[in-house]
Amino acid sequence: MELGSLRFAFVFALLLWPSSAAARGGDRSPFSLPRRMDEDGGMISRHLLENLPQITDDMLSGYMSNFELEMAIKEFGQRCSNISRVYSIGKSVNSVPLWVIEISDKPGEDEAEPSFKFIGNVHGDEPVGRELLIHLANWLCDNYMKDSLAMTIVKNVHLHILPTMNPDGFALRRRGNANNVDLNRDFPDQFYPVNDMLELRQPETRAIMSWVKEQHFTASASLHGGALVANYPWDGSEDARKEYYACPDDRTFRYMASVYSHSHYNMSLSKEFEGGITNGALWYPIYGGMQDWNYIHGGCFELTLEISDVKWPKSTELPILWEYNRLSMLNLAASLVKTGIHGRILSSKGGHPLPASVKVEGIDYRVNATRTLGDYHRILAPMERYEVVASMPGFQSKSTRVFVEDEATSLDFVLVPEEENSQKLDKIISNYICRCDGKDKLVLVEFLTGTHFEIYLIFIIFIFFLYLLKRKTKFKFLKHRQLPTHKRHNVV
């Protein structure tokens, strides 16, 4: 057997080793890393809360049941319908709907704005997040015409809030879902392809994966309990050791984590974690986690936020926890439009939006623009100079250098088609613009071959005449809506 195979078999055996629950560790998930090597090569485990007490009826008192949470979400949707919509992304194992609140001045509409999502109650025995997220939604509804931070989020961000990812685990008073699977170990993992079998995903996991693919989120955070720290990728390391394992956007993630930590009442004062933030693999490695999958496969910069030292505190402590975390949650969401680079990518031929990619030199990661509007939103640590490149097959790439300050920079790209691919690009662009299905295409063919053919021919001649006139004038780029937080507007 080759050395690589032996190494994989050894690590996989470790993954199957039983262990106690931890704030980020699994109960009986085959994809957590319950044990790791210490500096001397010995096996150690991390137990944030050993010998957890049974969750009693008294502990449940003051927390919303799943039914009460659903009613609270629907009541919010009715009370704040002018800035929100409520929708479901799927159901749990026990068929409980996974309700989401979207908050925006134009909910449900495509805008050239970043999207942020909060997810609570990933682990059933960590209920603080589901309560705080309802507080967050209500606070934004009550204050968006009074508070500048609330106004910034509502008008310039599409905020999506999933209060509970694991309603079954909450009802069962345990960490895992109804199948006793730790949902934060259930995502495909970059280091262990054995965890990539889609058919084995839990329904809650599949719902999140589909949601991320559909919504094009810019950034995200999941709320957990059992510690007080902002955790960022990578969550695992290649050799399963406890070590700092940086992702390509390590500097940006440290900036995001610090935004949360330093806005918190006391997270940044942590004696265990410098500045109240930590790299996941340095804390202790896990595999199959949600935040790494978001970054790799969803183009979404996600943090894992441990917001309460106690997993299931008394409900009387919830108002205090809300006040401790309120400004952190708001500042993290608002940071999407307060820094970084934002813009649109259009074709010089007709000004059509392009789903091109944006890459920063020196960072092995790409952010894609949306298909509908061609807008992109690239989070970057401030006070740095970056070389930004926009590219798409069939077009000439463009690059420029920008200095990202404490305010956001607006940077648009107009890409010029490669001459030899001009005709092919016409067809490609038309595919992005036209969303007609097969039936609509048949109706169109019937229309063109019927009694309207003469009219259509005259129309084509007229359009061609306009095209000849247009070639004599210089193409003028249509300036997109600029966020009020943007400092300057650049077109490349």
Image (spheres, rainbow, N blue to C red):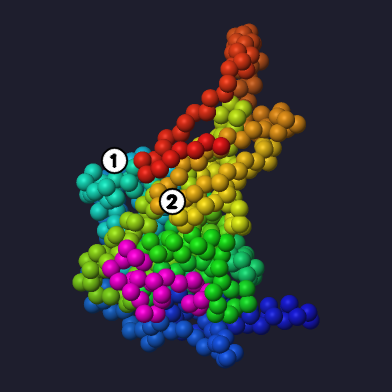
Pick the front one: 463 or 50:
463
* Among the 4 quarters of the image, the one containing residue 8: bottom right
Q: Position of residue 405 (x, y in %)?
A: 43, 51
Task: Name the mark on residue 405.
Answer: 2
Pick the front one: 108 or 116:
116
Circle nearer the N terminus (1, 2): 1
| Residue lying at 47% horizontally and 67% vertically, measured from the top left | 232
Tag 1 residue: 82
Q: Position of residue 272 (x, y in %)?
A: 39, 80
Is residue 282 in the magenta section?
yes
Q: Is residue 425 above or below residue 245?
A: above
Amino acid type at mark 2: Glu
Amino acid type at mark 1: Asn
Left or right, residue 147 beside residue 200:
left
| Residue lying at 43% horizontally and 79% vertically, measured from the top left | 22
Give the residues in magenta. 261-287
Q: Position of residue 244 (x, y in %)?
A: 54, 74
| Residue lying at 33% horizontally and 82% vertically, measured from the top left | 54
- Quadrant where the image shows the C terminus: top right
Pick the front one: 178 or 49:
49
Question: In this orientation, does residue 268 appear?
Answer: yes
Q: Residues within 10 Å of mark 2 (few under 14, many from 20)?
A: some
- Quadrant where the image shows the N terminus: bottom right
Left or right, residue 118 beside residue 206:
left
- Disc 1 to disc 2: CB gap under 8 Å: no
